Image (cartoon, coloured by chain):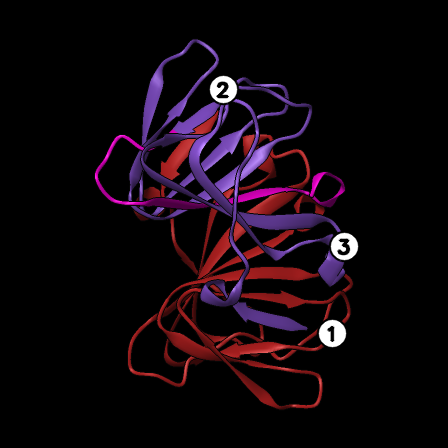
Chain colours: A red, B purple
Amino acid sequence: MKIISLTDVEKNEVNMEGAAGAWKQLPLGCADGTPVYSYRVFTVEPGGHTPYHQHPYEHMNYVIEGTGVLVNVEGEEQPLKAGDFALVDPSEKHQYRNKGDQPFKMICGVPKEFE
Amino acid sequence: MKIISLTDVEKNEVNMEGAAGAWKQLPLGCADGTPVYSYRVFTVEPGGHTPYHQHPYEHMNYVIEGTGVLVNVEGEEQPLKAGDFALVDPSEKHQYRNKGDQPFKMICGVPKEFE
């Protein structure tokens, strides 16, 4: 059993090409012995974004705070707000953008093999 | 891609033996095509609890709101509050209890085979 507050989890800037103003935390990952899945948390600053990319595994999101958009494979912006859940399918191109004036914070779950 | 607000997800009372004042929602599950994991949300009313039990798969929690306790295999109560993450290992006996005066709401992720 592990219990940790998000405020106690190390936060690192995302340095991937195509990312701007995005920060990552890993409250529950394979280093904790998670058998199947990992929970990361991304915080995107106002005006920031994650890369517009794709990969062979899914994302499972829960929006903790703020508002943003999830850009889909057609480049269309789907609104996201606190309390929303989202599933991005494997190999589906996507990007998270903060178009508001407050931080946008979300859980982003992935299979443990990828984090 | 699927996006859904938690407020739009059907909520059903947990009827398992040993549960009281506990409600379940399934915002992202295998019926949505989740490849690996499912996200349920449990809301436990003040004074309510989930069963004190164990099973061969883990729980991965994020506390959305309220305060509660996570009872471990020794029967000890570990406090949980909004913003906390918790991992309950496979086969680890556990129970969630709401000892506060507001609803206690948390994500409870499990492998998709179990939801």
Kind of residue indicated by mark 3:
Pro
Q: Does B91 sit left or right of A48 as displayed?
A: right
Closer to us: mark 1 or mark 2?
2
Which element type, helix, strand or loop, lies under badge 1?
A: loop
Q: Can you tell which mark lies on residue B35?
A: 3
Query: Which residues, given as a range, are shown in magenta?
Result: B97-115
In-front residue for pair A9/A92 = A92
Kind of residue indicated by mark 2:
Tyr
Please give the residue where the numbered disc 1 appears in the rendered image: A92
Discs 3, 1: same chain: no
In-front residue for pair A30/B110 = B110
The residue shown at (74%, 53%) is B30
Query: CB under 8 Å between callouts 2 and 3?
Result: no
Q: Can you tell which mark lies on residue A76?
A: none
Instruction: Identify the subunit bearing mark 2.
Output: B
The residue shown at (54%, 62%) is B9
Relative to A72, say whether B1 is above or below: above
Q: Quadrant of residue A59?
A: bottom right
